[in-house]
Structures are given as structure tokens and as C-alpha cells.
Image (cartoon, rainbow, N blue to C red):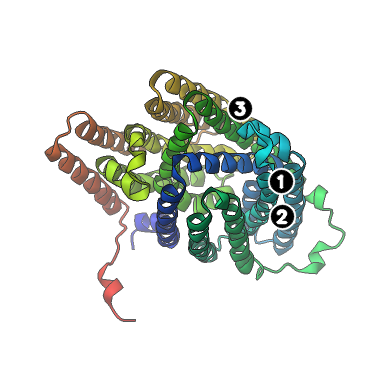
Amino acid sequence: MSQKKGEYSDIAKATRIFGGSQIVILISNILRTKFVAIFLGASGYGILALYQSTIALISTFSNLGLGTMAIKEIAGANNSKDQARIDKTIHVVRRLSWFTGMFGAFLTLFFSIPLSILIFDTPDFYIGFCWLSLAILLNQLTTSNVAILRGLRKNKKIANASVTGAIIGLFISVPLYYYFGKNAIVPALIISSFISFLRSWVFAKDIKVEKKYLENISIWNYGKPMITGGIILSITTLITIIKDLIIRLYIEQKGGLVDVGLYHSALLIINSYLGIIFTIMSMDYFPNLSSKINNEKESKSILNKQLVFGLTIIIPLISFFLIFNRLIIELLLSDRFTNIEYLLSVAVLGTVFKLYSWSHSYIILSKGDNKRFFWSEFIAVTVSFVLSIGGYSLYGLNGLGYGYTVGFIYYAIQTQLLCTYWYNINIKKSTLLIFLIGVMIILFTHLSTYHLNNITLKIVSLLISFIFGLLLLKKMQISFDLKRLWKKK
């Protein structure tokens, strides 16, 4: 077997594991979103979006970035093969998750009335926020369980937990929306959080720690690196959540809840459906990178391989989405949401630049340079916020698509320059050439679909995108034996 095939085999293996599970989750989300769109409508989506944004805001503030930093610390401990260090880290993560989860739940209860007034301009929603404090606690406990599994690279267990949680959540939440409409939003969110926690707990509980390693251990002292780095990360993520919340509140004031619902549904499609590639890759990329970040040569290799492999999947996916955009909207939502078609057609172009910037930003995060990471993210979020507000003010919903894509173009350039300047970690010229070719392919697809509207060019652009993916697979010497799927064991 050639060396090149071996270089990409780990990425391909992780992709197969998480790819299969994410397809099942994707189908579950498609069905859930379809039924929610029918039963709640755009205004119901607006309420759901504001609830979810608020939960994310409080969770981010209270969890101290524990989920991400735990993955980094556990992956580093696991790579060292030091069992005492591994057990101590897992023990600390579990304890801290309870502290941070309870803290978030208390904040939600205490500020339930102010939150209702701030978000909905009425105190009538405060009971909903009180109940959602349970979801915040459960989400934090789930995050710690998943972090432990990811840090130890228990990929099959993570995939299994995610799939079963999504399926069970679908069969419980959809009937609630059918029978109770908007009144089911809060119960459905809580039940979904509980199911996710339960499935993660089932798989994480088997990971035992030796009590002999836990004698005289101080949770706060041992967990200080995670807490310190996590606070910076939490503030960074909090800024992003605040940005999204302010944008939605601005849209609500200028365009109403319907526009908020349309904007939320557009982001849902991009982040949940096209964002599947990021979910799949991040599961293994971050733990792998964190365990080898101090080796410059290996870090460069991981960055380049991940970016090339990501382009293999995302370029054909974007081209397919551009051509069948309207059909996808009607399938996933309903014909009442077709106003977001052009918004999505522009925003989806930013996804390839998101892949580029995403791959580089993990370098900074894995290095543990918390202050540098904060300022990098803060500047990028500020630019994105200005572009989104300006875009909506000038061009309405379509302007949000422009702001999304231009923001990620800027972010891609910024992270590339910073990783090169700070760490001398950059992409190869061959990787950059592949990336630029991919960008030209999706631009050609967009031009053929939304400006020329030529059926022949659409077909040609789609074929080119798939040929591009197949050529990259051949370059990486990765193949999939489809005949084996039909053979008996």
C-alpha cells in the first residue's frame, strides 16, 4: 500500500464512521424541519430561533468553554499514554460539567423575566425560560460526555449515540408540534436535550477512572488550564452568539418575526445540512491536531490533508445544492420559504471559505494561544456583524447572504496570514491551487444557475464538480468498494 493512501486513511475512516451517522441525523433533521415548518410556520420558526439563540447565549456564558478545552486536554493526555493523567483529566471534566451546568440553569431561572422582556418585548415567555433551565443543565452534561469520547477518539460510540438520539428525538418532538403547535416548542427542546444526554451517558459511563489516581486532587487547581483557556474561548463564542442574537433582533425590528424565521431557516439549511461536512471532520480533526500540535511538520500535514479531503466532498455538494436550491427548500421546508432562495445561493458560496478558515482556526485553538485566538475571532466576528447588518439594511434578506460570504472570505485570509506569521504553519502551493480550482467551479455553477439560467451549463458545471471530487479521491488513492456492500458476510 502506498504511503499516500496511508496518509489519508485515518481521515477516510473517520469520515466513513461519522458520515454514515450524520446522514441518518441529516434525514432526521430534514423530517423534523419539514414538519416544524408545516406545523409552526415562519412566525413559529422565529420564536424557536429566539429561544435557541438565548439558550446558546447562556450556555456559552456559563460553560466556560469546557467542551472544547476538555477535548484538547483529554486528547493530549491520551496521546501521552499516561493513565494517571487521563483519569485525572476525565474526573475533573465530569465534576466541572456539573458546576457549570448548574450555574447556567441558575442564571436562566434568575433572569427569566428580564430575558422574556428583552427577547420578546413581553414578560409572558418567562415560564418558558424557567423550564429551559433544565435543557441548559442537560446540554452541559451532554457536552462533557461527548468531549470525553472525542478526546479518547471513541468515534463509533459518538456516532452511535448521535444517531439514536436524533431518531428518538424525531419521533417524540414531531407529534408534540402536531398536537400542540407553538406551545410544544419548550417541551420539545427539553425532551431533545434529555434524550441527547441519556444517549451520551450510556456510552460515556463505561469509561472508568482509577480512584487511586484521584487522591488529594483539587478540581480547581488541576482544571485551571481548562478553565483559563475555556473562559477565553467562552467569551469568544459568546461574542459570536451575541452577534447572531443582535442580528435577529435587528431583523425582528425592521422586518418582523417572519423575516427572523426566514433568516433562521436559511442558516438552518446551511449549518445543519451543508454544515454536515464540518461536523463530520471536526469530530476527529481537532483531537488529532491537538495531540500533535507541537510537531510543526505533522501539524502542517494534518492541515493540508484535512483541507484537501474537505474540498473533495464540499465542492460537489455546493454545486448540487446551487442547481437544486429551490427544490431543496420546498422539500426541507415548504413553498412558503422560497423567498430565501437567492439568499442561500449566495451564502452557500461562503461555505468553501468557511472550510478554509475553519481548518486554520483550529491551529490557533490547538496551540493554546488563548489571547491570540480571542483577538482573531473578535475581529472576524466584528467584520461579519457589520457586513450582515449593512447587507440587510441595503438589500434585505439577500444582503444577509452577501454578508455571510464576504465575511468568510475575510476570515479565510485572516487565519491564513496569522497561522503563517505566528507558527509557520501554512498550506502547500498544490493545496492552494486545488482550493482555487474548487472556488472557480462553484462560481461557474452559480453563474450558470442564477445569471445565465442555462440548463446545459448547469449539467456541465455539476459534472465538472463531481469529476473534481473523483480526481481528488484518485489523487489521495482512496476508493470505495461498492460491490462489497452487496456481498454476504
Task: Determine whether label 1 and label 2 are within 8 Å by CB.
Answer: yes
Secondary structure at badge 1 equals: helix
- For the residue marked with disc 1, what is the amino acid? Met
Residue farthest to the right?
A: 216
Q: Which residue corresponds to mark 2?
A: 93
Label 2 neighbour load within 10 Å: few <14, some 14-19, many 20+: many
Q: Which residue corresponds to mark 1?
A: 226
Residue farthest to the bottom?
A: 489
Q: Which of marks 2 and 3 is nearer the N terminus?
A: 2
Q: Residue visible at 72% across and 34% down?
A: 114
Asked whether residue 394 is in view, the answer is: yes
- For the residue marked with disc 3, what is the amino acid? Trp
Reply above or below: 404 against 126.
Answer: above
Q: Which residue corresponds to mark 3?
A: 375
Reply above or below: 64 against 154.
Answer: above
Q: Which of marks 1 and 2 is nearer the N terminus?
A: 2
In screen coordinates, is 158 left or right of 133? left
Q: Which of marks 3 and 1 is nearer the N terminus?
A: 1
Reply above or below: 260 against 324.
Answer: above
Compute the Cα span from label 2 to label 3. Answer: 26 Å
